[in-house]
Amino acid sequence: MIPAFPVYLFDVDGTLVDSAEDICGALQTVLSRTPRPDVEPAFLKRYIGYHLNDLFGDLFPEMSPEEKEALLVEYRSVYPSRGHTMTRLYPGVFETLSLLPGRKSTATTKGTPTTRIILEQFGLAPFFDHVQGTDGFPCKPNPDVIERSLDVFGARPQDCLMIGDSAPDMQAGRRAGVKICGVRYGYGNLPKMKEFEPDYWIDDIRQLIPLEIAHATQSLSDQAEA
């Protein structure tokens, strides 16, 4: 059982939303004009949660930093133009965020403006007290995106739970000193995530709901049906 926390920090892709089709589709559009137009979505999916420079560096080790930056700039244009039409909420996300106590923020490699758009598009924005993306500072596995929310909330690391589906999420959480919860239903490499010994694991986001809240909600539902 996972106890209630004063602060929850959520990764976005692979944790709150299943966005692989939009991300991989945008990447394939970018790669279609390179010497590697044939990269399969399954391969691209492995890089969700990492900085795209990791992907471009692995695909094009001979490229200069300027050339990789140009690909990144193109991706940042193509991805939002898709309108997130193939992105979906994972089951139980809306219910969980509506019932979960404590303050909530995001801790994502996406920029803050894009993160806000997604939260608003899928009706999640009202549940968040703060929205934090990676804006001009090192991305996960560096702890900066987590520490920004802690600063905003004036929260102690030990009072926070970071929820994510990738090894960078787990490593960033460990480096920030917060508790970490690994998501098994996302895109991450589970063996790599296990290396950071998450405090908790979930197969469904509803497992975050404290037991007393889940029981109270079920009791009210039963009364309404009676």
Image (cartoon, rainbow, N blue to C red):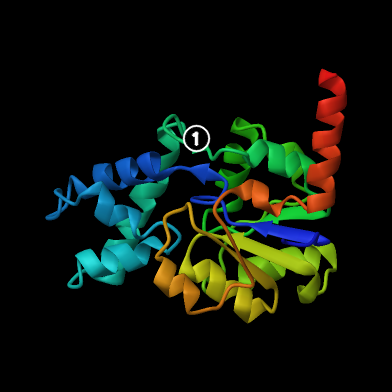
Q: Position of residue 43 (x, y in %)?
A: 25, 56
Q: Give 125 or 181, whichever is nearer the viewer.
A: 181
Dot 1 surroundings within 10 Å: few (below 14), some, or many (20 or more)?
Answer: some
Q: Give 157 or 192, whichever is nearer the viewer.
A: 192
Q: Position of residue 142 (x, y in %)?
A: 55, 75
Which quarter of the figure has residue 44? bottom left
Q: Establish if 143 lies above or below 98.
A: below
Residue assigned mark 1 = 88
Q: Amino acid at mark 1?
A: Arg
Q: Establish if 142 lies above or below 14.
A: below
Q: SS at mark 1?
A: strand
Residue depicted at x 78% and y 75%: 158
Q: Give 197 or 132, whichever is nearer the viewer.
A: 197
24 left or right of 1?
A: left
169 left or right of 150?
A: left
Q: Establish if 82 lies above or below 147.
A: above
* Residue 54 in view, yes or no: yes
* Residue 142 in view, yes or no: no
Residue depicted at x 50% and y 35%: 88
Q: Position of residue 151 (x, y in %)?
A: 78, 68
Which quarter of the figure has residue 62? bottom left
2 left or right of 83?
A: right
Where does the C terminus fall, quadrant-wise?
top right
Residue depicted at x 54% and y 40%: 90
Where does the N terminus fall, quadrant-wise?
bottom right
Residue depicted at x 28% and y 63%: 56
